[in-house]
């Protein structure tokens, strides 16, 4: 005869932490996890896949994390990265910090060891106080200790990641949580979807009036679009503001394509003219950080008034006084500005002075892009890339390196929003292959990565990941044999110069060995032919583009930040 307890457990269906976590994510419209598995989260990945979720498994957590971060940027939903404890967690942490720094929503979920042992430092398997280590690198760090709190934990993580200024969230998942059980009925009741997780933030009417007044009185207004403007996904509204007012705009790197780079009001090719010359600058989702010379100095010329649109109120005055702060979400603020500026037209002579300079810069650049050299340089190789990509306006372009980054940003045009994905606020190397996996899987469209050879090395092993999932990604390695340059000689050095790699590396062979396509390009014509062939094939491909080792310059376009020893220099 059965006793009472047996009878109850047989009659009651149970669920556990693994299943509750999966149900909570699915309920919140999350369909993809990027990660590296092992104790204690392996079963999470297996069950997630068995229940229809996408799982993209990487060779190193940093790249899974970078994938999650850029998925967050592209979709406005938090990208999810799952790792094991201590070392796996730390490998993922760089990407979490990167997501937070760049204002991308992302959740890093790491399994963790037994609390009692960790807290007494008794030497558990992969022991680490992960929660406290994560805290300074993200918007919030939470631990879920009880299965009944999984619903709240996920809701809190999602709301934190996407509301206000988006960013990274850490979720600590102790091993024991996964096997805790609840009845299916109680479990289902504990899960929910947060209502309005990223609420609109309407700007105050007097703040709008102040900004409208300033803009209407400007002689030389300029709109500066940052990646926050691209993230906001109010592309039509931003385009309408620019076209209705006739104000010229210039995009920050990842805002390229929000309006086509070929738009007649695009002042990017006259950047060093418009920044100092403008009198009122309207920042839309761009911080006055190092990338904008902190809003000061000769980059900006003399007196300048800033209007700043940002959801983060204390971003205002971070570097210089903001004359008209507009705190709110970009969609709401731009809508309010359009109403306030109805009928206003910027002085056409300002725009035509800019257009003249833009035409001049383009005319100056054109022959460099078309002139052949014995070995390819950054101009003619990327000129060839630009011509090919004209026919593929919806590809995502991933880009990292120094010369490979700065020249690509300048030369290769973007036509659609959120298609240029690069090193961002930190200028971090290593985003390459993780970004490629996410861009390909999230958009379902081809991806091209333009990679410095040093930059590529940070995530190069992930080309196996591209092959495993048969992703339509073409990686171009700009192989100049080193960091910045490949021909450095250091007088008196005992080894090869510290910026150099082995000359003549065939990165294409690496891709072939994993089962992808490899090409070796030594001229712009070959590069163009292989690139087109690769995109059209839809297969994972690596093109080893041989670049003149002497072609690059130290630090690309940010030489001014380079610190050089003055000791021993001749006066
Ligand atoms: O107006 P002017 O005359 O000034 O001209 C501007 C525009 O008007 C013009 N322009 C155009 N002309 C004609 N036609 C068109 N269409 C056009 N459009 C524009 O072009 C110029 C430039 O325009 P831009 O870019 O808008 O303006 P500017 O002044 O450059 O903008 C300033 C910035 C600051 C906004 C911009 O430069 C920028 O965004 N820079 C980002 C720089 C960056 O982040 N760099 C990466 C970091 S460098 C370094 O740290 C590296 N590391 C160290 C390291 C890192 N980073 N991470 C980790 C984890 N570990 C170590 C390493 C290891 S780089 C690196 C590897 C490098 O070696 P690789 O082999 O990978 O790469 P190679 O260098 O290729 O060898
Ligand atoms: P960039 O590097 O392109 O200049 P930044 O990363 O410095 O751009 O700035 C992005 C800014 O956009 C951040 O200050 C962030 O708070 C802001 N932001 C992001 N999303 C929104 C939004 N929906 N509404 C308002 N501001 C936003
Ligand atoms: Mg290089």
Image (cartoon, rainbow, N blue to C red):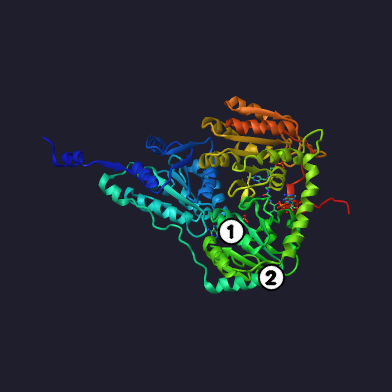
- For marks 2 and 1, the one nearer the N-term is 2
Give the structural element (helix, strand or loop) at label 2: loop
Quarter-wise, where is residue 489 in the image?
Answer: top right
* Percent coordinates x, y for residue 64 in the rendering: 52, 41
- Asked if 66 appears above or below 231 in the picture, the reply is above
Does residue 416 appear in the picture of this structure?
Answer: yes
272 lies left or right of 233: right
The residue at which mark 2 appears reads as 218
Give the structural element (helix, strand or loop) at label 1: helix
Of residue 161 and residue 251, the one placed in the foreground of this image is: 251
* Percent coordinates x, y for residue 341 in the rendering: 60, 69
Q: Residue at x 60, y 48 (%)?
A: 416
Of residue 571 and residue 439, the one placed in the foreground of this image is: 439
- Asked if 22 appears above or below 496 in the picture, the reply is below
Quarter-wise, where is residue 571 in the image?
Answer: bottom right
* Percent coordinates x, y for residue 329 in the rendering: 52, 62
The residue at which mark 1 appears reads as 238
319 lies left or right of 119: right
**Mark 2: few/some/many CA within 10 Å (<14, 14-19, 20+):** some
């Amino acid at each position: 005869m059965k006793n009472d307890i047996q009878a109850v457990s047989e009659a009651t269906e149970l669920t556990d932490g693994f299943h509750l976590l999966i149900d909570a994510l699915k309920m919140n419209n999350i369909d993809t996890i990027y990660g590296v598995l092992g104790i204690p989260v392996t079963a999470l990945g297996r069950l997630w896949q068995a229940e229809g979720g996408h799982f993209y498994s990487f060779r190193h957590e940093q790249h899974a994390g970078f994938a999650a971060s850029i998925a967050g940027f592209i979709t406005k939903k938090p990208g999810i990265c799952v790792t094991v404890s201590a070392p796996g967690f730390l490998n993922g942490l760089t990407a979490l910090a990167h997501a937070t720094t760049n204002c991308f929503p992302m959740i890093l979920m790491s399994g963790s060891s037994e609390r009692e042992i960790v807290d007494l430092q008794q030497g558990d398997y992969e022991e680490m106080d992960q929660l406290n280590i994560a805290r300074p690198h993200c918007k919030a760090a939470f631990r879920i200790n009880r299965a009944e709190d999984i619903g709240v934990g996920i809701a809190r993580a999602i709301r934190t990641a996407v509301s206000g200024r988006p960013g990274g969230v850490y979720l600590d998942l102790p091993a024991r949580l996964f096997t805790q059980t609840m009845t299916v009925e109680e479990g289902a009741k504990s899960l929910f979807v947060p209502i309005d997780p990223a609420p609109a933030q309407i700007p105050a009417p007097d703040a709008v009036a102040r900004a409208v007044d300033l803009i209407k009185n400007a002689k030389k207004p300029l709109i500066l679009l940052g990646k926050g403007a691209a993230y906001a996904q109010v592309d039509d509204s931003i385009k309408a503001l620019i076209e209705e007012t006739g104000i010229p705009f210039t995009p920050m790197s990842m805002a390229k394509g929000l309006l086509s780079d070929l738009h007649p009001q695009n002042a990017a090719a006259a950047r060093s003219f418009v920044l100092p010359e403008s009198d009122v600058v309207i920042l839309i989702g761009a911080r006055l950080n190092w990338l904008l010379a902190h809003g000061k100095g000769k980059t900006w010329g003399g007196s300048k008034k800033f209007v700043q649109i940002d959801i983060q109120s204390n971003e205002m005055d971070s570097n210089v006084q903001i004359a008209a702060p507009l705190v709110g979400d970009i969609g709401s603020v731009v809508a309010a500005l359009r109403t306030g500026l109805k009928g206003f037209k910027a002085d056409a002579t300002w725009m035509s002075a800019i257009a003249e300079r833009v035409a001049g810069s383009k005319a100056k650049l054109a022959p460099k892009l078309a002139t052949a050299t014995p070995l390819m340089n950054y101009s003619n190789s990327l000129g060839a890339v630009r011509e090919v990509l004209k026919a593929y306006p919806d590809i995502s372009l991933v880009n990292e390196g120094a010369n490979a980054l700065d020249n690509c940003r300048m030369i290769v045009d973007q036509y659609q929003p959120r298609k240029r994905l690069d090193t961002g606020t930190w200028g971090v190397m290593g985003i390459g292959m993780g970004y490629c996996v996410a861009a390909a899987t999230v958009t379902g469209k081809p991806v091209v990565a333009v990679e410095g050879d040093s930059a590529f090395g940070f995530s190069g092993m992930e080309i196996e990941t591209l092959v495993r999932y048969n992703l339509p990604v073409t990686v171009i390695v700009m192989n100049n044999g080193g960091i910045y340059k490949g021909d450095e000689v250091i007088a008196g050095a005992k080894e090869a110069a510290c910026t150099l790699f082995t000359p003549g590396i065939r990165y294409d062979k690496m891709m072939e060995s994993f089962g992808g396509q490899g090409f070796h390009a030594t001229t712009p014509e070959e590069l163009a032919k292989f690139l087109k062939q690769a995109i059209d094939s839809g297969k994972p491909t690596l093109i080893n583009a041989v670049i003149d080792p002497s072609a690059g310059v130290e630090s690309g376009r940010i030489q001014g930040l380079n610190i050089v020893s003055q000791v021993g220099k001749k006066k």
